[in-house]
């Protein structure tokens, strides 16, 4: 017998997977005599949504779940409560006293912070899967409602915060419509004000100077659900202007950084402090760089030294020929990335996919390095200098707290800590694809998907309840999205073909 196991802290008493399977094989005979398929009554859960959540002084308690705080100062609990008042977390711990607070029964559930996507082109939502076989490089086989529908889709998936890299700013009216779509979703977001994509622009094109108007009109407060980031792509002529405007406004400056499009020499100049038209522009702690594939070692060292943030979109990077995701480079520099979904024209924005792909990619590279170190040894030891394989806990940190840090929002979100805003997801661990629950981080990263996201809370307000998004007419929105898609295809002169190979 094992005292820890009896107390609910399951232990692995086998030295390897093979030994573990041997040790458990005998139990199959005993288990066969038990009627495993006899139906049992489901745990009762109150179907009523707590009212007025997120409003000042409104209190409710999430009770009895397995709480994974993702905060270094708050422990994890096999069974505990999270008390919320207004939009903030008041307390986390077992058997909290909550007075007359409404109760959300989280028994059999995992309670954790919502996922954070640090790079997502939501304006492309209407073109989902259109470039499922697409590549990044030109010449190779294969580039208001979109923002809203894309945001709601990720809310449904447990992604409570997004950096929306918006590249439809052909006029101030386009910018305002995009911002309204994000704000209408009720989701926490960083609006990325990037260029209007395309080779030519009309008379109303105002990027990057319209940033001043946008900041004053939409982002005058430092305490709101949607914030602003300045986009400054270094492959565009005159990018220094965008960087300087962003810094003048006190905004982060974000850019896609990858070896295609000849970016490496330009980025080297920035790393040396000789970037831009004036030859004086440099990298700073206010930069957020996406992908970072194919960059030089000195440039990487500069990124590390100044504390710039790095966002990886591992499935897209592997799929669209961006270059190998620089997971091992980050580890060698003792850096950690945040995670992002990039483009739904090619691949899902589901964050369980992002986490699994990140972990699988890194472990594949590391495992092969270990095997190659001694080909004659079937179980070679890990050689010095080879990074450790990623763990589920580390990948979860990338997907939550690191995302908050990279968007300068870790004072508000990214972990379950008293005083932070309540961006919380409740995941069903009793579901067929997860039960029995044996290890919380492993269950979330290795087993779960969108169907396990039962409840989603943003700034204390419940946005999804027991598997259903609240306060949205999805049928109506879907029809609008389809109309948007039809307009785009007609304007581009492309015939719709559900079985085309792009």
Image (spheres, helix red, strand yellow):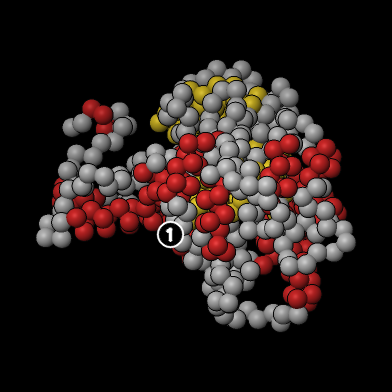
Secondary element type, mark 1: loop
Q: Determine which quarter of the picture holds residue 52.
A: top right
Vertical side of 334 occupied by 350: above or below: below
Vertical side of 300 occupied by 494: above or below: below
Q: Determine which quarter of the picture holds residue 423.
A: top right
Vertical side of 15 occupied by 500: above or below: below
The reply to whether residue 401 is visible in this rendering is no
Residue 188: percent from left, percent from top: 67, 40
Residue 302: percent from left, percent from top: 49, 41
Local crowd size for mark 1, using a 10 Å CA cut-off: few (<14), some (14–19), many (≥20) = some
Which residue occupies the foreground of this view, 102 or 163? Answer: 163
Which residue occupies the foreground of this view, 35 or 400? Answer: 400
Residue 103: percent from left, percent from top: 59, 29
Which residue occupies the foreground of this view, 255 or 370? Answer: 255
The reply to whether residue 501 is visible in this rendering is yes
Vertical side of 89 occupied by 43: above or below: below
Residue 252: percent from left, percent from top: 65, 40
Q: How many marks?
A: 1
- The N terminus: image quadrant: top left
Residue at horizontal 57 percent and vertical 42 percent from the top: 273
User: Which residue extends farthest right?
Assistant: 203
Residue at horizontal 46 percent and vertical 57 percent from the top: 294
Q: Determine which quarter of the picture holds residue 229.
A: top right
- The C terminus: image quadrant: bottom right
- Decide if residue 380 is on the left or right side of residue 298: left
- Decide if residue 212 is on the left or right side of residue 124: right
Residue at horizontal 80 percent and vertical 47 percent from the top: 209
For disc 1, the marked residue is: 324
Residue at horizontal 75 percent and vertical 76 percent from the top: 492
């Amino acid at each position: 017998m094992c005292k820890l196991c009896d107390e609910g802290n399951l232990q692995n008493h086998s030295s390897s997977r093979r030994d573990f399977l041997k040790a458990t094989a005998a139990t199959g005979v005993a288990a066969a005599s038990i009627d495993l398929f006899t139906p049992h009554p489901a745990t009762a859960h109150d179907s009523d949504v707590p009212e007025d959540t997120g409003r000042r002084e409104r209190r409710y308690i999430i009770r009895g779940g397995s709480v994974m705080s993702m905060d270094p100062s708050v422990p994890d609990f096999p069974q505990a409560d999270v008390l919320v008042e207004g939009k903030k977390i008041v307390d986390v711990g077992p058997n909290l006293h909550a007075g007359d607070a409404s109760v959300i029964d989280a028994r059999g559930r995992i309670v954790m912070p919502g996922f954070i996507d640090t790079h997502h082109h939501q304006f492309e939502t209407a073109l989902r899967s259109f470039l499922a076989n697409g590549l990044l490089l030109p010449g190779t086989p294969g580039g208001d409602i979109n923002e809203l529908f894309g945001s709601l889709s990720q809310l449904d998936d447990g992604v409570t915060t997004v950096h929306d890299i918006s590249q439809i700013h052909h006029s101030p009216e386009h910018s305002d419509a995009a911002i309204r779509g994000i704000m209408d979703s009720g989701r926490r977001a960083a609006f990325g004000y990037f260029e209007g994509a395309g080779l030519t622009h009309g008379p109303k094109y105002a990027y990057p100077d319209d940033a001043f108007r946008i900041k004053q009109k939409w982002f005058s407060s430092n305490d709101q659900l949607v914030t602003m980031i300045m986009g400054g792509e270094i492959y565009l002529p005159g990018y220094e202007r965008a960087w300087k405007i962003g810094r003048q406004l006190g905004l982060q400056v974000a850019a896609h950084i990858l070896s295609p499009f000849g970016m490496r020499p330009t980025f080297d100049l920035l790393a040396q402090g000789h970037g831009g038209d004036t030859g004086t522009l440099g990298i700073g702690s206010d930069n957020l760089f996406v992908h970072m594939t194919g960059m030089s070692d000195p440039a990487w060292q500069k990124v590390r030294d100044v504390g710039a943030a790095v966002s990886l979109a591992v499935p897209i990077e592997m799929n669209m020929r961006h270059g190998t995701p620089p997971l091992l480079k980050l580890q060698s520099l003792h850096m950690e990335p945040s995670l992002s979904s990039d483009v739904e024209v090619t691949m899902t924005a589901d964050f369980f996919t992002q986490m699994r792909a990140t972990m699988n990619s890194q472990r594949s590279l590391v495992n092969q390095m270990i095997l190659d170190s001694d080909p004659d040894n079937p179980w070679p030891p890990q050689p010095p200098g080879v990074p450790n394989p990623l763990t589920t806990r580390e990948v979860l940190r990338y997907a939550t707290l690191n995302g908050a840090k990279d968007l300068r929002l870790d004072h508000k979100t990214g972990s379950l800590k008293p005083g932070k805003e309540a961006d919380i997801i409740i995941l069903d661990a009793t579901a067929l694809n997860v039960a029995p629950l044996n290890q919380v981080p492993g269950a979330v990263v290795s087993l779960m998907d969108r169907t396990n996201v039962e409840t989603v809370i943003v700034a204390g307000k419940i946005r999804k309840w027991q598997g259903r998004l609240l306060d949205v007419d999805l049928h109506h929105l879907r029809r609008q999205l389809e109309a948007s898609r039809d307009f785009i295809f007609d304007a581009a002169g492309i015939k719709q073909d559900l079985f085309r190979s792009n």
